[in-house]
Image (tube, rainbow, N blue to C red):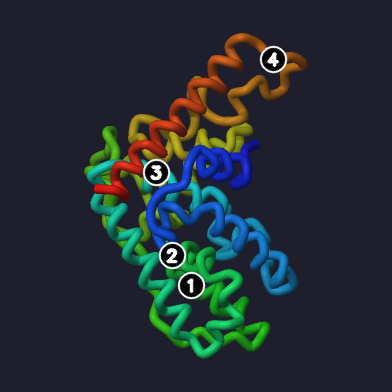
Amino acid sequence: NCTIDDLLNVINNIDTVGEELSVCVSFDEIDTQYAAFVEAFDQAIRRNDDVDRDGLPDAYALALLDATCGFANCDVQAEMRAAYLDNLAALDAEASATALAPYRKALAALMLISQSAVDQLTEILATDDIVLAGTYTVVSSTAEGCIVNYGTEGVEGELFSADGDYDGDGESNVAEFRRVDFRQGGIPEFIAAVTDALLDGREDVPGVGCGALGTGSTSSTLGDLVALLAAAALLVVIRATRKATNQG
């Protein structure tokens, strides 16, 4: 299965654009800081791949934030960027800002996902006498207008959380994750499912994900190579769109 390292490192190694504080160009640091946070607070974190314990692994939720950066003319992208900056500012204003500094970008990103993430992170940090007293912003919106195939059942809520329904198809993000995981898919298959109301995680998505590259096979095939090239081309398009958005 793809991990957050697999997906985000590929995306972020294509190029680096934009401002240092933008969530859309910070995922390499977010990934690194997330790993450092999990290691530092290992004893307090009950599930080290799902800090808020909502059933959707953090790597998948963070990847959905990153995917949103690739959508042009997307209102929720602006809301996500604003929430990230609000959370960075709140962390920097805390009395324990120095202790929080090594993890601030990862924490700011995680906190915009859900209130349960804010609550769980507050409890985890308190085990090391780090008190969060500020107000943190969670994105509560819909992705309507962001994606081509948006469903008819979308409701405003914590869009990036486990219970959120990013593509408005009436299926929660975590339900689609569980189907993808059952089929031994990874992050790319999850992103495909939750950003398209016509998909719900049951489908094979040609050319998407590490799982598409000959999983279970003893040798590579021409089809695998084509799938890899298609996935790489998709990442280039995402980055090009992101660059145009940041410079616009």
Spatial CA span between label 3 and label 2: 17 Å
Left or right: 158 as drawn, with respect to 78: right
Q: Nearer the viewer, residue 142 or 182?
A: 142
Question: Where residue 30 appears, x then y in whole percent?
Answer: 54, 59
Spatial CA span between label 4 and label 2: 40 Å
At label 1, counting other C-alpha atoms closer than 10 Å, the crowd grade (few under 14, some 14-19, many 20 or more) is many
**Residue shown at the point (55%, 45%) measured from the top left:** 8
Q: Are marks 3 and 2 in contact (CB under 8 Å)?
A: no
Nearer the N terminus, badge 4 or badge 2?
2
- What amino acid type should be assigned to the residue bearing mark 3? Glu
**Residue bearing mark 4:** 220
The secondary structure type at the circle numbered 3 is: loop
Nearer the N terminus, badge 3 or badge 1?
1
At label 2, counting other C-alpha atoms closer than 10 Å, the crowd grade (few under 14, some 14-19, many 20 or more) is many
Question: Where residue 132 appears, x then y in whole percent?
Answer: 51, 84
Left or right: 44 as drawn, with respect to 84: right
**Residue shown at the point (33%, 40%) measured from the top left:** 169
Spatial CA span between label 4 and label 3: 34 Å
**Residue bearing mark 3:** 171
